[in-house]
Amino acid sequence: MHRDDVAHLDRLARRVDGPGPVTVLDPLARNLLAADQAAGLGPAGGKWSVTGSEIILYGGGLSPYVPNTVSVETVPAVGYTNLQWRHPTFHGIPVVAGQTYTWWAPGLVASGAVMMSARVAWYDASRTYLSTSAAPAAGVPLVAAAPVNAAYVQPYVAFTAKGVWELGPSVFAAGDIAAALLAGELPPGEGTPPFSITRYSHVATDGDGAYRDIGLELVEVVTA
C-alpha cells in the first residue's frame, strides 16, 4: 500500500482520531442497507425514524419477518413529512466523498405512495449537514455523487399526502445501478456493520520503502 493509505489505516488502527468502531465498504456490495431494513421487515426501532406522530410504522413489531406498513397520519404545513432510513451505529450509512451512489424505495413506489422524488442528506465526519440530493422526478431512482467531505448519508422519502402503504424493499448501493433497479432487480441488503480492530501489523516491503504490507484483524461489534 502507498504511504498515504498506510497512514490512514494506521490512524484508524491506533484510534488516533477516536475510539471507533470502523466499517468496511465492500465495493462489490449491491445494497448497503441491512438485510431486514432492505426488505422492509421487523421492528422499526434503529432502522427508520419519523417526526413525532406524523408517520406510524406498524406490523413489523410483531415479528422480525413481518412486513411493515407505513401510515402517514398528518402532513404539516410545509407540505411533506419524512421517513428516514437509519444506520444502527453511525450517523448515517458510511460513504466515500466523490463516489456515486444509487438510492430508491421501489416498494413504496409500487404501493402507490404519494411522495416527492427520492432524496438523501449528506453529512461530514463531524455529523454536520452538507447538502441534499434529489432524483429528477418522482418514482425513479436517485443517482448522485457524495459531495466533498461527505462521510455519512441518510436516505429518505418525503410523503406529501396522508395514506397507508406497504413499505416493501429499498436499496442504497454504491455505483449507478438505476437501470438494473428499473429492470426489476432487488438486491438483498448486506449492511455496513461496525467493526473493532483487534490486531494490527505493518512492515515495509522490499525496495525503497515506499510501500507497506498491512495486516488488520476485524471483529464485528454486536449488542447483546
Image: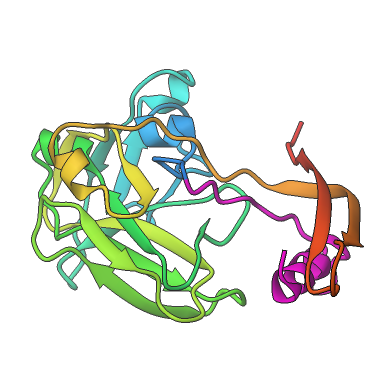
Q: Is residue 40 above or below residue 56?
A: above
Residue 28 on the magenta segment: no
> What residue sits 84% from the left and 60% below the top?
13
Say if the magenta span includes residue 16.
yes
As displayed, is residue 139 above or below residue 61? below
Relative image position of residue 1 (x, y in whole percent): 72, 63
* Residue sitting nearer the eye, 22 or 69: 22
- Image-based side of 87 in relation to 154, left or right: right
Q: In terms of image quadrants, where is residue 221? A: top right
Q: Position of residue 202 (x, y in %)?
A: 89, 59
Q: Position of residue 96 (x, y in %)?
A: 50, 66
Relative horizontal placement of residue 70, taking residue 43 as reference (left or right): left
Image-based side of 72 in relation to 3, left or right: left
| Residue at horizontal 74 percent and vertical 36 percent from the top | 223
In the displayed orientation, state which residue is furthest to the front.
207
Can you see residue 18? no
- Screen quadrant of the C terminus: top right
Q: What's drawn in magenta, residue-wise?
A: 1-27
* Residue sitting nearer the eye, 152 or 215: 215
Q: Residue at x 79, y 74 (%)?
A: 210
